[in-house]
Every structure is written in C-alpha cells, then in structure tokens.
Amino acid sequence: MRMSHLLAGAAIALASAGPVLSRPAPPAAAAPVSEKDAEARADRLLAKMTLEEKVGQLSQRFDIASLFPTGAVAPPGMPPMTPLDDNVRKAELGAVLFVHDPAVANKYQKLAVEQTRLKIPLLLGYDVIWGMRTMFPVPIATASSFDPAMVEQARGVAASEARALGIHWTFAPMIDIARDPRWGRIVEGAGEDPYLGAAMAAAQVRGFQGAGIGTPGHIIAGPKHFVGYGASMGGRDYDSAYLSDSELHNVYLPPFAAAIDAGAGNIMSAYMDLNDVPASANRTLLTDILRGELGFKGWVVTDASAVHNLVKQGFAEDKTDASIRALMAGVDMEMSMSPNAFSTLVGAVRASKVPMKRIDEAVRRILTVKYRLGLFENPYVDAAAAQRVLDDPAHAAAAQVAAERSLVLLRNEGNALPLVAGAQKRVAVIGAMADSPGDTTVSLAFPQDAAKAVTIFKGISERLNGVATVETTPGVQLSRLVPSPLAGLRGPAKLWTPAQTADELKKAVDLARRSDVVILTLGEKIEMSSEQASRSDLTLPGDQRKLLDAVLATGKPVVVVLMNGRPLDLTGVYDKVPAILEAWYPGSRGGAAVARALFGDVNPGGKTPVTWPRSVGQVPTYYARNLTHNPDTADKRYWDAPSTPLIPFGFGLSYTSFTIAPPTLDKAELAPAGRIVVSTTVTNTGKRAGDEVVQLYIHQRAGRQSRPIRLLQGFERVTLAPGESRQVRFTLDEANVRYWNSVERGWVIDPGAFDLWVGNSSTAQAHATFTVGGKPRAAR
Ligand code: BGC
C-alpha cells in the first residue's frame, strides 16, 4: 500500500490508497446471484409476461417529486411533481430515477411487488457522480490526483451511501474525453487524455460496483455518455459533434473500453448528433461498436428524454418512429422526464414494425440485472440502518484525503508557499467562493449536506485557531448572464446594487490592508460548470480581476486559491501573483484540505489533467496533437500570441524538488507479443517529503497514419521522504503501440522507431528510443 507519511498519523490516512475503509454491512444485503442463474430466471419470467409488461420494463421515469425539496415548485418546463405511484402500480415502469429517501424507495418497491401481477421490483437510479452525502472533489479534481486507487475508494464510499438509501445504480462515471474548456461538463470527467481517462474510468467502475454486480454495499455503474458528447462543436453543450473514425477509436472510446473491461453493468447513450446521427439512435455506435467491438453485455439506457428528443432533433417523425429507431439501434431502456415514448412500442410490435425478439432481448438484460442484484429476494432497504452508513466517520476522512491528493500547485515563485502557521497574525480570506459552502461542493438533492461543507475560510480558521485572527469577506458577487437550470432549486439570487458592489470591494481592500497575508479565492461559482454551463470566454467572471488588482495594490502578500471546474484564462493573474493553488471544487472537507496544504501539513502533488490555454482563442489545445509539415514553426502558429499553452497537461509543482533520471530500457526492440520494461529513478532532492507523478510518453515516428507527437502511456504517483530515491518501472507491450487505423478500419501495429520520454509533465525531457519489431500487422 502506498501511503504518504505526510498523511499518516491522522484518521485521514485511512483512505490513502489501500483497502482500509470500514464498510458497514449494507442494509438489505442480498446474496449475489450468478449471471447464469439470473439469466435462466429472467427467461422463465419473460415467458409469463404480456407485451405491455415487457414494454414497462424498458421504461424509466424521473420522479420529479424526489428531485425537489418538500414544498418546492418545479421550475417552468419541468413536468408536474406528481408521484409515480399509479405508473408503478400499472407496471408501466421498470426503473425510476432520483429517489433518494429510503421511505420513498420502499413505498415504490411495495407497490411494484405487492400490486403488480408479476411482482417485479424496480431499479432505482441516481446521479451519484462525486459523492452521495459525503461529497468528494469534482471528477476533474480527482483525476488531477493521478491516483486511481484513491478514486476507486472514493467511489466505493459513494456507492455505500447510495445503496444505504435504496439506490441500485448510478449514472456515472462520466467518462467523456473533454478537450474544450468552454464545455461546462469538462468538470464531470477526467480531462483530455484517453490513457488517464481509461485508468480513471476503470477505477470508478470498480469503486462503484465492488467485486461485481450484486456485491453488497455497492451499486451498478453506468458510464456515460456514449459517445462523443465532449466533442460538441464550440464547446456548446448539446451541440452536434463530428469525429473522425480515428479520433473516435483512438481518443473517445478508450475510457469506455476500459469501463466495460472493468465490468460496467450499464451504459448511457448520449443525446447529441454524432456525425449527423443522434447517438441515442445510432446503430453503428450502440450495436456495432458497443457490443461488437467493445463486447458490452449489460443494458443501455438513454440520457434524459433522448427518445422524445429524436423528434426535436429533426431525426424522427414522431415518438413511435423515435422509439422504434432508438430500440432497433440498441437502446434497451428509455429514461424520460415525461410519460415514456417507449409505450408506443406496444403498438409498434403489434403492427410488426418491431420484432418481439428485440423486445425480449432488452427485457432479458434488465430482468437479469434485477436478479443479479438480489432484488427479487429483497427489494427493500433498511431505512433504520441507513444513517449508520451515512455517519461513518471514515467517509469524511476519505473525502479529505481525496481533496488533499487532488490539489495542484500551479505556481510558487520564491517559495511563497507554504505559509508558516502563526507567522502572520492577521489572515484575510477573500473572494466570492471563500466562505460559500455551496461553491465548495454541491449536492443536487441534499443542499443541507452541502451546507455543512468546510469552506476555505472555515478550514483556515480551524487550522489557525489560537495562533492567528482569520477574517473573510467576498469582495465581489458573481452571477451568470443566463441563469443556471438549477437556479430554481436555490431560490432567486439577490443581486448587489452598484452602491453595494463598491462598498463590498472597499470592505475587501480594507480587510487586506489590516491583514498580514491575503488568501484570495478566484474562479467560478459552481453553477458556472456542468450541464448547460458552457462559456464563450475563459477569463475570470465578474469583477475578480479588479478585486485582485485592488488587493495587490495594498502591497500585502497574496496567495491565490483557484476554485473552478475548467481551465481558465489566467491573464492578469498568473503574471502578478507568486503562488496559485488549484483546489477545483474540493468537496465536503475541501477547506480543511486546502488549509493543510497552504500551511505545509500536506504537500500538493496533483497534476493538471487538461491543458490550460492562454486565452479562449487557443482552444482547442491539447498536448497529443500531430506534427505538421512545418514543425520548425510550431512556436509561431499565431502572430499575436505565443503558441504554447499557459500550463501543459500533466504539470503540477511541489514544495520539494525532484529529479527523474533518464529512462533505461531492458531491450531496444518490442518484438511481436513481447514487452519492454522501462525504468527510471525518481529522487526527492528537496527538504520536505512530497509526491511526484512520474509520467511516460511515447511517439511513433512513422507509419501508416500520423500519430500524436506525444501520448501518455504510463504514470505512477510516488511519495518520497527528503533525499529518498525510488525506482519506477513501466511495462510496454503491444497495447501501448497499437492504434486504430482509419483507412484499414482496424487496430494495427506499425513497426519502426519510437521516441520515449519520462518526466513530470507532458513536456518531459528525459528521452530514449526503441523500435517495434515484426511486420506491419493487425492488432486486437
Ligand atoms: C444528463 C445526464 C444525467 C441525467 C439524469 C441529463 O440531463 O445529461 O448526465 O445522468 O440528466 O440526471
């Protein structure tokens, strides 16, 4: 087990990277049922079902009432908040989403198993994305940890909390590759890189599902959105995506392949058009690729109302046409906000427009999973036991470790950080997100739990208790020009008047003046990221630059803590401030983690999983681009700006320093079916313990297709004491050099020369070469 000794000694160390969390036995645990047994039972049940009952199993509905707090009024455009009792009683639904109260879960299950003819229990699904009650850092943050073991544990905690509340299945992980920071949903994934994305995808599936479907205390993972949603044009949410066959296979599919290999039970189909065919009615994607190439065996659910949307998208004539085409493309279950379009399938079968065989296939997949979960033996959740799971102190400890390991130190000129606790008697914590629990984390259904989040101000106050006075003020107010779709959940925002705006800024400057150091949080409010949260600009919203300049003008030392869900244009920040710590949205224990990093109790060791452009005009920019015919002018792509990004992929600093020795290879040639072991030695040359992420990149020099200038093909995060060295070994085999060739439409291996680098970012310098032997060949 790798465990940073920086973390040791506290309860915090519990969740570092090993299987040490105490997992209380889940309520309503049922013995897992084998796949074969489940299938046989599903077939026997299927034989008794009417067509209407079968179609009901293929339908999932939003429980709008569960989505909103009691007494709330659904925002315009949302269907009424009527509970689904009647639909469940009439066997019209196979699954419901958004139930998160054990009493409601049990109410629906009771209706399903006591009042329907065949007593088939419901599947209850929920967006457990970065936590259930205990909130972890957002996924782009946990990807920054380059620590899949930690991420697996974090998802395990979320699964145990969700299962305790009666949830069986999550619409997660979100594993869309995202190379455009304008796209708001970049926050939900692991960034731009397919190799890191695949590692994080597999870790999350293992974390959610445990040893496999039906593992007590775990839930089914539903990786999403299949596929290409992250490539929406202009970073505009929902817009069409266009991907070449090469990009689809080499960049966007690998996280899905990894998630499926890790056993993911479900896949969610995306909304948008991919190459002019909506992903949720795209047979090439949902059948040929998903089942044929990737070998997926579970069931496919659509994204919300995606079948109805096929009509809006100008693809299907009406909801019958939409349902037929989605089902025949490979969708097994329709997720819908309003009454399900799939109910039209009853008529479609009777009119011989859909073969019963296809309906049976989809129903069998859904029933099989219900048997594997043990729901027929026990559909209920033990409401009385749920609180015990939610209150497990190990969960908060895991959230804190996750936050600490996700921090990225972006800048630290003159060793401005860490600060020495108590050296400054008056500490100012300024910024719109500085003391905002909702912006430290967000919990869709449990705003009251988000309210308990440790903010940056709270974390610093607790850390400096008794040794310094800590004060806070926001300084600025940030708001969206177009309100967030979730704004209705939070009630109307009270916007500051111009006089208040001036007054608040003055208050912040006054606080800075009477302080010895200013910790300034800059970035975006949490509702500026995620769904319907794309931007046309990446600069700091609102008056934050003005606030920064005013605070800097006081002459007081300033440290910036960034809170954001996407790379930002840091013009006017990066060049003016000596220390920048990227906290992302760090979760329930985020403020405590940030405080420990600022005062040197932990040493930041994360790396950015996405390239930071200097300005929005550089988008898209990612490290794994191809060479061009004119590589000598690669630094002159623009005449009005540098061509390099502000911060390269894989970059992050530490309070200590490391050297990474030139790589040595145990052989110079990768023979067919062979392997090469690459070794390097990483040494902590500084005075503090710390973590380094050793990264390995390769480049194919020539072949049947141009290949990226660099590709990540290995990484390992290591913790080293001052002066300590560690050998890190990576094994390369054919999987590392194969690629999808868009001319031959298959995986191939090209023999020839490859470059290899090891280092601590995508600009790694320590270089070696190797060759791939044999003939040009197909690969699996
Ligand atoms: C999102 C999905 C999500 C679903 C259910 C959709 O709007 O695109 O990612 O799982 O809603 O909440």
Image (cartoon, rainbow, N blue to C red):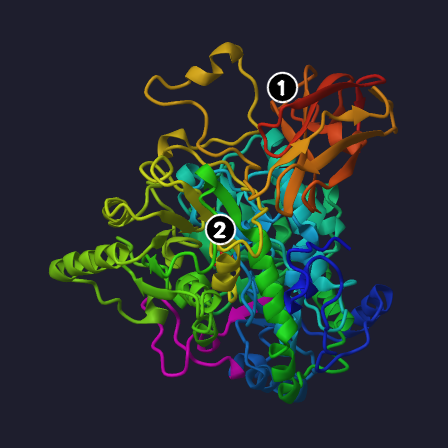
Give the residue displayed 63% in from the left and 19% down from the top. Answer: 706
| Image quadrant assignment for residue 573 | top left
Give the residue displayed 54% in from the left and 33% down from the top. Answer: 243
Q: Amino acid at mark 1?
A: Ser
- The x and y percentages for residue 433 are 36, 59
List the residue tagged with mark 2: 187
List the residue tagged with mark 1: 706
The quarter of the image holding the C terminus is top right
Would residue 81 be counted in the magenta stretch? yes
Give the residue displayed 56% in from the left and 70% down from the top. Answer: 134
- Precedes in sequence: disc 1 or disc 2: 2
Q: Amino acid at mark 2?
A: Val
The relative height of residue 587 versus residue 411 in the rendered view (above or below) is below
- The x and y percentages for residue 615 are 36, 33
- Position of 91 with respect to 778 (left or right) is left
Which element carries disc 1, helix, strand or loop? loop
Cα–Cα span, label 1 and label 2: 30 Å
Front disc: 1 or 2: 2
| Image quadrant assignment for residue 253 | top right
Classify mark 1 as within 8 Å of ligand 1 or not, answering yes or no.
no
- Mostly what secondary structure, the magenta segment? loop
Residue 356 in sight here: no
Q: Residue furthest left?
A: 499
The front one of 759 and 125 is 759
Q: Which residues are magenta?
A: 58-85
The relative height of residue 52 versus residue 656 in the rendered view (above or below) is below
Number of numbered markers? 2
